[in-house]
Image (cartoon, rainbow, N blue to C red):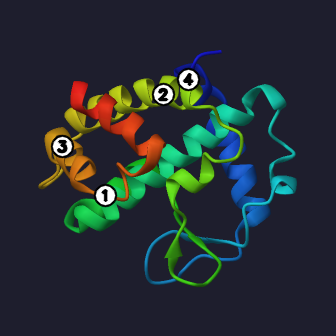
Amino acid sequence: MNPKEYYYNRFYQQFESWIKKTATHEHPNEGVFVFVRDLKTENLQHIPKEDYMFFHCALAGTILIDQVMYTHFKEDYLAFQQMTLYPKIELGLTGINVRPWAITHSGVGLTTLENFFEFFVSDLKEFFTKNKFKNVTWDAVKLAMLADKDVVSDARGEILKKILEKN
C-alpha cells in the first residue's frame, strides 16, 4: 500500500478510533479541540502492524498542517477546520500543542516519513490550489512552513523542508 491509498482509505477510520480512545473532551468555544491524555501505544492497538508507520506519519502531517493554519492563518482557520474536520490536538489540558515530530519518533524510519511527505505535500498543494480561502494560498502555506523553525527543525523537519522547496 502506498501513502495515498493509506491516507484516503484507512487513516481516517483509525484516526477517529484513536481520538475516541484518547480524547478527554472538546473545547466549547474554540471549535473542535481534542485534549489527548497521552500518546501511549496501548491506545494504538487497533492499528494493524502494517499500517503503524503510515498512521504515525499521517497523524504528524495532520497535526502539522492544522497547527500551521491555526498559527499563521487564523482568518481562514475556521473554514479550513470545517473542510478538513481536523481536531485541534493538545496534550492534556495544558494548552501545549503536540509537536508533530514527537509523533514520528515512535519507530518511524526517515525513508518512510520522506515517502509519506512526498505524497502529503503534493496533496496539500492540490488542496490549497483547488479550495479558495480569503487569504490562504499554497504559496503562502509553503512559505509559512519553511519560515517556521518548529516545522523545519531536526532531521524530520529537514526532510519536509527539502520536499517543500521542490514544490
Q: Nearer the viewer, mark 3 or mark 2?
A: 2
What residue is pinned by disc 2?
Answer: 114
Task: Check disc 2 and report its element: helix, strand or loop.
Answer: helix
- Could you tell me the amino acid type at mark 1? Lys
Report, in whole angstroms, how far the alpha carbon at label 1 lies from the one at label 3.
Answer: 27 Å
What residue is pinned by disc 4?
Answer: 3
**Looking at the picture, how far across and down is residue 72, in whole percent?**
24, 63
Going by the picture, which residue comes out furthest to the top? 1
Q: Nearer the viewer, residue 9 or 115?
A: 115
Q: Earlier in the sequence, mark 4 or mark 1?
A: 4
- Could you tell me the amino acid type at mark 3? Lys
**Looking at the picture, how far across and down is residue 129, in whole percent?**
20, 33
Task: Check disc 1 and report its element: helix, strand or loop.
Answer: loop
* Residue drawn at (49%, 48%) of the image: 62
**Is 94 situated above or below 47?**
below
Q: Earlier in the sequence, mark 3 or mark 2?
A: 2
Report, in whole angstroms, how far the alpha carbon at label 3 lies from the one at label 4.
Answer: 25 Å
Going by the picture, which residue comes out furthest to the left? 135
- Could you tell me the amino acid type at mark 4? Pro
Q: Nearer the viewer, residue 94 or 21?
A: 94
On screen, residue 125 versus residue 110, left or right, reads: left
Report, in whole angstroms, how far the alpha carbon at label 4 lies from the one at label 1.
Answer: 26 Å
What residue is pinned by disc 1?
Answer: 149
What residue is pinned by disc 3?
Answer: 132
**Looking at the picture, how far across and down is residue 38, in whole percent?**
73, 68
Q: Earlier in the sequence, mark 2 or mark 1?
A: 2
Q: Nearer the viewer, mark 4 or mark 1?
A: 1
